[in-house]
Amino acid sequence: MTDQDQHISAKLTFRHGVHPEEYKELSASAPIERMPFVDLYTLPLNQHIGAPSKPIVRVGQYVRRGEMIAEPGGFVSVGLHSPVDGTVTAIDLFDHPNGQMSPAIQIKIDPFSTQQLPKPNLPPVEEMTYPEFINQVQRAGIVGMGGAAFPAHVKFSIPEGKSCRYMMLNGCECEPFLTCDHRVMLEYSDALLDGTRILYQFTRGEKVYIAIEANKPDAIQKLKAAVGQTDLPLEVVPLQVKYPQGAEKMMITAILGEEVPTQKLPLDVGTMVSNVGTIAALSDYFRLGKPLIERVITVTGTAVRRPANLLVPIGTPMRQVVEYCGGITDPNPRILLGGPMMGMVQKNLDVPVIKGTSGILILTEQEVRDLDTYSCIRCGRCLDACPLFLNPARMGLLAKNGLWDEMEEYNVMDCFECASCSYVCPSNIPLVQSFRVAKSIIREKKARNKNV
């Protein structure tokens, strides 16, 4: 079967969505390289959804690679570890990729260290109880590595009264440009399958699906061959190439034909979805004793000299990552963290790589230009694009008039900000940005009312 045939053969998908240009060819064939160590690392305490981590080191303290330097600040929080042997030089406010100043721990590398990880000091995961496993995942600092950085142990904790019938490994990587998950599936397939086995030991579902968009035929072939060597109930499922195929609700609809109800989670339909990088990180921790101190990212775009997939220590300055890739070719580049659909615009590169950094996208000034915004012409394109069958046009009008309660009635809280509506809008209305603001205001309002 040719690559093209395999691409066409995938039939499973969801309704609606969009088809942006993929631009995967810039980095899809670039093997993962290890980013060289640098002199100074900055590790924000809030690299995940939930409560920030709490420092347990002091300025001047020598720390070892993989040593915990900040403990979880609550249940919805994770540990933070040193990516190198070195000395804590500061615990202060530093620039964060979210555009704010954030508490962080800064570590200066020991130039004479071999940077070898110490031998793991964990009991075999096969002998752990479920609570012990959850506690270890939290201490390991593992979060969802598809971009959201939701603490993995929270997702892996199955509430009483619910069960996990299906595990889904998300290898779709539907964002244009990004290829880090693609390379993880090709190069870390052993760790991916081992991490699957570790998690399956505790979930014991009926089936495990590895979902991959059909534009990655080499990954599909590689994992199908590997799955044939295991005794797990695994199936590799090629999905149609469509954005946002990698959203967990869309994936569940495509594979199972079920819809996750409004304001509900995948476990409410007996399903657990995890990114392939997150699952591979389980193997790294429980077999090698390596917490989440580094991750694979894609450095790509038309304005970077050498697109690449890199294994980068957490806390590495993004400027040095880009310089390792040959630097920027445009005098006024546009920089995004993540892909072009859901990525975060970055004003400069003087911020660190964090756990949720899936890619650094650098485009030319001509490719990303400011557009004039016009009034809604009621063309209905946003309704046809929204994968959740929301009404972006109506919600945009409500947002314009500050009618937040009415937006909630139109289920704005279900929006996962895929930006499909903004992508197709002929009037260039920043719909998803207005929804993001509305959701923040609604959450703040509910928090205030709860504290009254």
Image (tube, grey):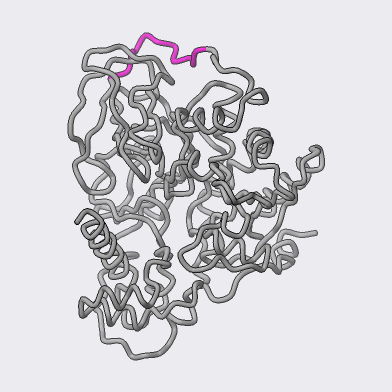
Q: Residue at x 29, y 35 (%)?
A: 44
Q: Residue at x 40, y 90 (%)?
A: 379
Instruction: State the image coordinates of residue 359 (x, y, percent, origin top left).
Output: 42, 47
Q: Quadrant of residue 430?
A: bottom left
Q: Quadrant of residue 47?
A: top left
Residue 425 higher or lower than 378, as above or below: above
Q: Which residues are magenta?
A: 108-118
Is 203 within the magenta?
no
Q: Residue at x 64, y 55 (%)?
A: 212
Q: Quadrant of residue 424?
A: bottom left
Residue 396 higher or lower than 448, as above or below: below
| Outermost residue toward the top in this view | 112
Is 112 within the magenta?
yes
Query: Could you tell me what secondary structure mostly forms the magenta stretch?
Result: loop
Instruction: State the image coordinates of residue 431 (x, y, percent, origin top left).
Output: 32, 73
| Quarter of the figure that contains the C terminus | bottom left
Q: Residue at x 64, y 20 (%)?
A: 124
